[in-house]
Image (cartoon, helix red, strand yellow):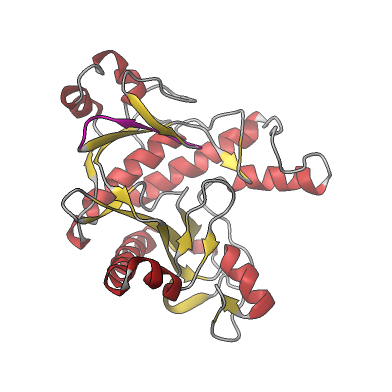
């Protein structure tokens, strides 16, 4: 596996290029997702990649897809480069780009909502709550402090934003758009997956504070879990040993990067827009280490090939 990859160039039809991934068309039924080491913050993609980040996102998702298979259909087929090269014509000379970073999946029509589950109040939920006592306009229990654990996990759908931030919405809004049956299926599956993920992570020293899932419908009408699952980019992982409500928590993600950029913004040295500032080597290394540690704790093994 290459240590760092800023983007893939494969002899397949490129469906879209996101902040992190390239999505290629394999055939009418399958897609190939390739995760680079690009990293974004405040909706700006940094110039410097984070070593091993793409492999962590891919291989951790593959781990969860296998572990959670009993909870319903998903789109995952394989994250093994050897399998992918055998399955997809023309990729034999591109194995280095695929190793550890590529995932072959079933093609689906994505549902137009993020399915967010919150076990703890933080992020945008805390920001709204401390101002109005609500989440997406709906009343929450009184007396919560930052990072409080909810009595039961909260399903909190959001719109998908092509640029900028997703918007928290009510369940009623999702039901109105998708129908009651589909909306309820999304809610129950999301809550079940969150519960299983949290139960796996906590004995390994990680709190799953919140996460977002994406679902898609395949050609046969089956609702499948898609995209990435329970990764540091789609979830907040907090170290259990240092958890204390009433303040923000450290996390196993790009927190070192965000902290550095917050410092620049506070000092008036960056306005939060493109072009991004140059990242010091130590910030990149610290961010990479957070991703690798999350993988090791959750799976019980180091990421293959990584230090």
Is residue 153 or residue 137 the one in the foreground?
A: 137
Rendered view: 284 above or below 253: above
In the rendered view, tell whether residue 103 sits above or below residue 189. Answer: above
Query: In this rendering, would 283 be left or right of 107?
Result: right
Q: Position of residue 280 (x, y in %)?
A: 68, 31
Instruction: Give the image location of residue 63, x and y in percent.
Output: 28, 46
- Write the start and end of the magenta stretch as one range: 19-28
Say if 107 sits above or below 132 in the image: above
Q: Position of residue 120 (x, y in %)?
A: 50, 70
Query: Quadrant location of residue 283?
Result: top right
Find the residue positioned furthest to the top: 93
Residue nearest the viewer, comparing 140 with 261: 140
Which residue corresponds to the image point at 45% horizontal and 52% vertical from the top-left?
A: 234
Residue placed farthest to the right in the image? 268
Residue 47 position, x and y percent, is 61, 28
Asked if residue 154 shows in the view, the reply is: no
Query: Which residue corresponds to the image point at 77% horizontal and 40% vertical from the top-left?
Result: 270
* Residue at point 52%, 65% (across, down): 168
State yes or no: residue 70 in magenta.
no
Classify residue 98 by image quadrant. top left
Question: Which quadrant does the N terminus fall into?
Answer: top left
Residue furthest out toward the bottom: 142
Quadrant that contains the C terminus: top left
């Amino acid at each position: 596996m290459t240590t760092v990859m800023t983007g893939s160039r494969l002899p397949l039809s490129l469906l879209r290029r996101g902040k992190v991934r390239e999505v290629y068309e394999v055939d009418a039924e399958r897609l190939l997702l390739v995760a680079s080491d690009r990293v974004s913050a405040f909706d700006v993609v940094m110039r410097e990649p984070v070593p091993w980040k793409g492999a962590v996102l891919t291989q951790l998702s593959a781990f969860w897809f296998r572990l959670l298979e009993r909870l319903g259909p998903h789109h995952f087929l394989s994250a093994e480069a050897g399998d992918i090269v055998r399955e997809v014509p023309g990729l034999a000379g591109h194995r280095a780009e695929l190793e550890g970073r590529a995932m072959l999946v079933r093609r689906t029509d994505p549902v137009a909502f993020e399915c967010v589950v919150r076990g703890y109040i933080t992020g945008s939920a805390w920001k709204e709550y401390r101002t109005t006592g609500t989440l997406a306009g709906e009343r929450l229990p009184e007396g919560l402090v930052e990072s409080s654990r909810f009595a039961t996990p909260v399903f909190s759908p959001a719109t998908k934003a092509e640029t900028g931030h997703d918007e928290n919405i009510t369940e009623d809004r999702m039901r109105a758009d998708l129908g009651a049956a589909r909306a309820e299926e999304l809610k129950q599956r999301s809550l079940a997956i969150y519960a299983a993920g949290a139960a796996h992570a906590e004995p390994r020293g990680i709190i799953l504070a919140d996460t977002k899932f994406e679902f898609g419908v395949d050609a046969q009408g089956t609702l499948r879990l898609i995209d990435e699952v329970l990764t540091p980019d789609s979830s907040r992982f907090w170290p259990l040993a240092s958890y204390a409500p009433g303040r923000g928590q450290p996390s196993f993600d790009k927190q070192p990067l965000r902290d550095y950029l917050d410092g620049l913004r506070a000092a008036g040295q960056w306005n939060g827009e493109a072009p991004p500032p140059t990242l010091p080597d130590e910030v990149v290394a610290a961010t990479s280490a957070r991703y690798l540690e999350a993988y090791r704790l959750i799976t019980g093994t180091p990421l293959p090939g990584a230090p």
